[in-house]
Amino acid sequence: MEKFFGLKQQGTTVRTEVLAGVTTFLTMAYITFVNPAILSDAGMDFGAVFVATCLAAAFGTLVMGLYANYPIALAPGMGLNAYFAYAIVLGMGVAWQAALGAVFLSGILFLIISVLPVREWIINAIPRSLKLAISAGIGLFLAIIALKNAGIVVDNPATLVSLGDMTAWPAILAILGFMVMVALDWRRVPGAIVIGILAVTVIGVLLGVSEFQGVVSLPPDPSPVFLQLDIAGALQLGLVTIVFAFLFVDFFDTAGTLIGVSHRAGLLDAQGRLPRLRRALLADSGATLFGALVGTSTTTSYIESAAGIKAGGRTGLTAVVVALLFLACLLLSPLAQTVPGYATAPALLFVACLMARGLAELDWEDVSEYAPAVVTAVAMPLTFSIAEGLGFGFVTYAGIKILAGRPQDCSIAVYLVAALFIVKLAVLGA
């Protein structure tokens, strides 16, 4: 493992990588039951989608770990699954089989772009200030997800968001878990995040707030969704825009996640570029193709990987551990579902605090640099989309540089991506 993953070179150990893998898995294990719940609303079999979710996550994460050697986990993307179920299937009346076909076609386009130097050229051309903003923006995005999962922040039709019931046990336990994690980390206790997650879970079960689901059960039958995609149906003219919508969001969600998480892990080189980027992109696009075949919506890189990186994960061994845990989850689904959202919420909030430090590294003497960066960071949580926040950043960065008489500060790639985002909003909408 030392020779294959280069553990000493990255300053890590097998124990640290395994612990990091467990941490990442615990923060994203919710997808194994949230994704089936969403896609079942589109008429898909819950149990079959559960199996597809575990298999897609395991495959994509394993390729990311073994081929790209990055501690980044993949799974069916939140937001993309909701778009799949509620906007396409229920909203437009498209059969879920054809929608899966659209996901598969977007994965093929994604794979082609990943093989060509186009995508790598675009990602590496992102200005340093926007890269710092992406890291901070993902942190703020994680924060709002954490507060929402804990019931601390709730929706409000009058004010958009408001404070939840702070006397409820989930909110109280989440706050307690956050304080425990921060205190243990300050004391340099190994596994602070995992300890916090498990402690909150046990307390929640003892208080009766959460229910112990059991340990082992046989996996459900995957056949209702396995290889059920309708590619011919997805090739209809009316679904072409849907294919490109999947591609567009996956493209920039992945770009934002790879850059933001890698920056916080110190994996970017001196020029701010990500080594082995092409391999990471191929792993992501291949996961989307595999996910569509087994029966789930777009599979993408997960921002929750930041939790494992905070726990010390630096190589693909972390991802391999996550992949194996997703495979084990096929048999241990009751145990995985025992960990509630309010137990993983403090871990996400803790990681959010760490990632927000990226804003401190901005050039606060140049308004044309820090203004687009702040817009990027703020837009991610408020639009609930990494891709949309990145889009706002590109458009404002290019526009400000042109109006400030400094168009030479932007590369051709920046202007191209800004134009693509404008066209996307005009033609495809949000």
Image (tube, grey):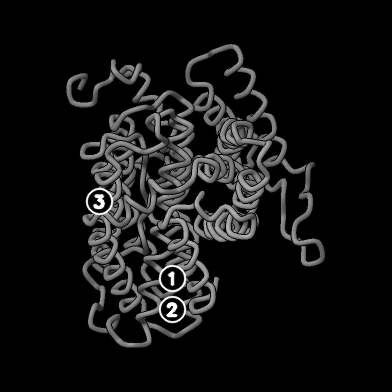
Specify which label sits upstream in the sequence, 3 or 2: 2
Q: Are marks 3 and 1 in contact (CB under 8 Å)?
A: no
**Mark 3 to mark 1: distance in Å?**
23 Å
Specify which label sits upstream in the sequence, 3 or 1: 1
The answer to whether residue 71 is visible is yes
Image: 232 above or below 354: below
| Residue 3 percent location from the top left of the image | 17, 20
Q: Which residue is mark 2?
A: 89
**Mark 2 to mark 1: distance in Å?**
6 Å
Residue 382 located left or right of residue 344 = right
Q: Which residue is mark 3?
A: 282
Q: Nearer the viewer, residue 155 or 388?
A: 388
Residue 25 located left or right of residue 294 = right
Q: Nearer the viewer, residue 295 or 417?
A: 417
Q: Amino acid at mark 3?
A: Leu
Image: 6 above or below 137: above
Q: Nearer the viewer, residue 257 or 14?
A: 257
Q: Which residue is mark 1?
A: 84
